[in-house]
Image: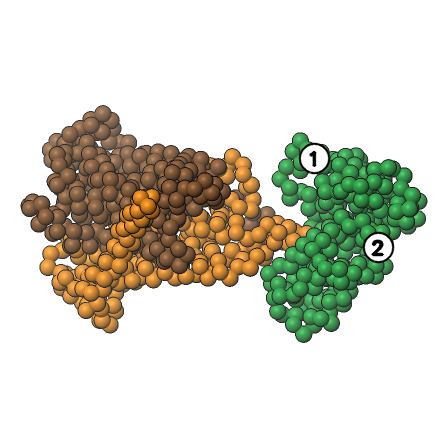
Amino acid sequence: MSQRLSQWIAFSLLFLATLVVVLPVVVILAIIVAKGASAISWDFLFSMPRDGMSAGGILPAILGTLYLVLGAVLFAVPLGVAAAVYLVEYSGSNRFSRLVKLAIVNLAGVPSVVYGLFGLGIFVIFFRFGASILSGALTLGIMILPVIITSAREALESVPRHFRTVSLSLGASRWQTIRHSVLPHALPGIMTGMILGLGRAAGETAPILFTVAAFYLPRLPQSIFDQTMALPYHLYVISTQVPGVPENVRYGTALVLLALVLLLNLAAIILRSRFRARKKW
Amino acid sequence: MSSTRLRKLKEWWIEKAILLSGIFSVVFVALIFIFLLREGLSLFRGESVFDFLLGKSWYPISDPPRFGILPLILGSLLVTLGAAAIAVPIGLAAALFIAEIAPGRLKEGLKAGIELLAAIPSVVIGFIGMITLGPWIKNLFNIPTGLTALTGSVTLAFMAMPTIVSIAEDAITAVPRQYREAAIAMGATKWQTTWRIVARAARPGMVAAVMLGIGRVIGETMAVMMVTGNAAIIPHSILQPVRTLTATIAAEMGESVQGGAHYAALFAIGIVLFIITFLINGVADLYLHRSRR
Amino acid sequence: MVTRAAKFSIQGLHVHYGSLCALRDLNLEIAAHEIFTVIGPANSGKSTFLNSLNRLIDLEARSRVRGEIRLDGVDIRAGLEVETLRRKVGIVFALPLPLPVSIYENVVYGLRMQGVRDAKTLDAAVERSLRESYLWEEVKDRLRTPAMNLSGGQQQRLCMARILAGQPDVLLFDEPTSGLDPISTARIEETMLILKEKYTIVLVTNNVAQAARVGDRTAFFLMGEMIEVSATSTMFTTPADSRTSDYITGKFG
């Protein structure tokens, strides 16, 4: 009897702890939607900021974030998928592949602000790209590389070995085997990683602080060597640096950013679970 | 035949490119370190490492400037310990619940929820912490500002939890089923099995989860900058404003002059952060490998 | 004894996995257009032998191969590209392993990898090879449907068609009917007997009766060594080695 009671108490406590972890998602979402929804309008999404950001829209920040995220993915996906192919299909388990794996673990652990310093040092200053979309996108790209590599690796490893054996036995070369019998079946997993990378890059602020983000730039960027505003930095600016921005504009900006990031992540979660459910091998 | 040769040539290049991509991730880690050193080491021409790490004052723009980061280290430490004190027990408990107790559907839902929590941009969490948690803490303790180390700890705890939960959950799930079956067969209750057998067997993975969670907290920048009040003084209480290593870089880089001592000092802080997280991740990785064996 | 030209001639073949010796000093000739069957208990080196013939053995990380295998007089390591070798020497595995694409794409996979693009050539190859494996009538109206939807026996015949599309010389079968019911097994065996008119067949089987039904010659492998090789009828009536007779009469294995 007392055993049952202690079990009941223990399980309740664990459940409570789980609620504490998960509930903030709901709470944060509820607060931001409740207070920010009123700010969302056609004008807010598609026009320039006015009056020192206290009025008008956030179009340059939205577009800036889209450019940065696309640039980051364009850089990181080919590189990351190729690195994953190397690890899974070519290297076996030699010393060098262990070094690569350790490097990936460490890339994943480097603080985002250190990526910002790195981007400043290498892209802005050393390569003379200046504070620009190019510098910011490359910095974000390197930052999301571990996400891309890790999910691509998982996806490749989940492709059964016998696909490779069969393909090779039919006279395909090693690369043909990867290209036609492995990569297509790993594609949903690779896509999942790509979307997660998109979401991560869209939400990060610290890496773009010194590499691209403009405080207030009410025009659209003209080239990849332009600075740009970006959603997360804009939220930081209007909530800490500029007094007098109406509350609903702040919440509205937070809502747009949160919606963008959460929708991307939700898409990744759904894609992954459907992929897992559909797999027949 | 020549088309075959062309194909072979193409494949040779592709395979070299793939190898190169593998090399790149190692190169990037090295490059990060090299560029931090390149920009940061010049500080130590005029400053001893000892004074930098243990100096008690950080006055980067006074004359003469003082670049002692002890207050920043202590600020990071205080916020991190506070966050760990909250996030570790709650996170591990949640991981046990999700891995061992929650039934199928609920489990998937909870895992998705945790993934979404992990995905919320830190600037959004900072924004919410600043606007809701800050005033609340201010009123609760009746202090002049709600932007304190405690506010930072609570905010960061929520950012550490997803990491802790998901990695610990993996480790717990990986415990062989026979362990559970043997314990149940010997008459243990489900709870006894979970606590005495499963949690113990998953311990290395749980240690790794905690370390990676702490790594995330130490490296966190935006949220912590928005909620801790940013006073670069040695803290005496958790209800004081503090300034962390990360927030210092983010807040001051914009004002520093490229190539100057302040600029170099900020990169030197970057070196310190890089080394700390490198060590934490390395050790966590060792534990993860041990848990997989 | 070998009347026709040797398709494979194997000399001093040793295969090791790490420190384990899986095949020891094998010397053998396989004639063109015969069905050469290999019997023996588990871990006797049968599959290792088969995988050496098309160098799939190279995929095993720790494998080392010594000795010489010649296909039509050409050394398969020094004288042939591995892709060409595998096209000439196709293999059907123990389990039906269609790729998760359509029936059509399974059959033309090898041809596409060779760079064949012409739709008519591909269509013709599909019909020819599916007819050769006696699957055409059953699938001709649903070539674009997933191969995974076929029954086990059909899948195995699809795997045969997939090899035949590449116009090979030799067909290797690695216990091809171990997962199939008796009727599907019988159909595969009938197909083999017809295919040997055009191809050389090496059949590894754990089913002694199957060797007796289809084999022209049979070899008995035990613990990495070939104990005996002779005409199938001889082996099953008057085996030379007592271990062979013990095995085929079911005393072990």
The spot of residue C121 in percent (x, y) is 71, 67
What element does badge 2 sit on?
helix
Q: Which chain is orange?
A: A
Looking at the image, residue A29 sits to the left or right of residue C123; the answer is left
Q: Nearer the viewer, residue B18 or B154?
A: B154
Q: Nearer the viewer, residue B11 or B234?
A: B234
Q: Nearer the viewer, residue C163 or A245?
A: C163
- Any mark on residue B238, and which? none
Q: Quadrant of the C terminus of chain C?
A: top right
**Residue position for label 2:** C214
Q: Colour of chain C?
A: green
Looking at the image, residue A179 sits to the left or right of residue C8; the answer is left
Q: Colour of chain B?
A: brown
- The image shows residue C205, relative to residue B31, as above or below, that is below
The amino acid sitting under disc 1 is His
- Any mark on residue C16, and which? 1
Looking at the image, residue A225 sits to the left or right of residue B3; the answer is left
Please give the name of the residue rendered at 71% of the width and 71% of the height, measured from the top-left corner: C138
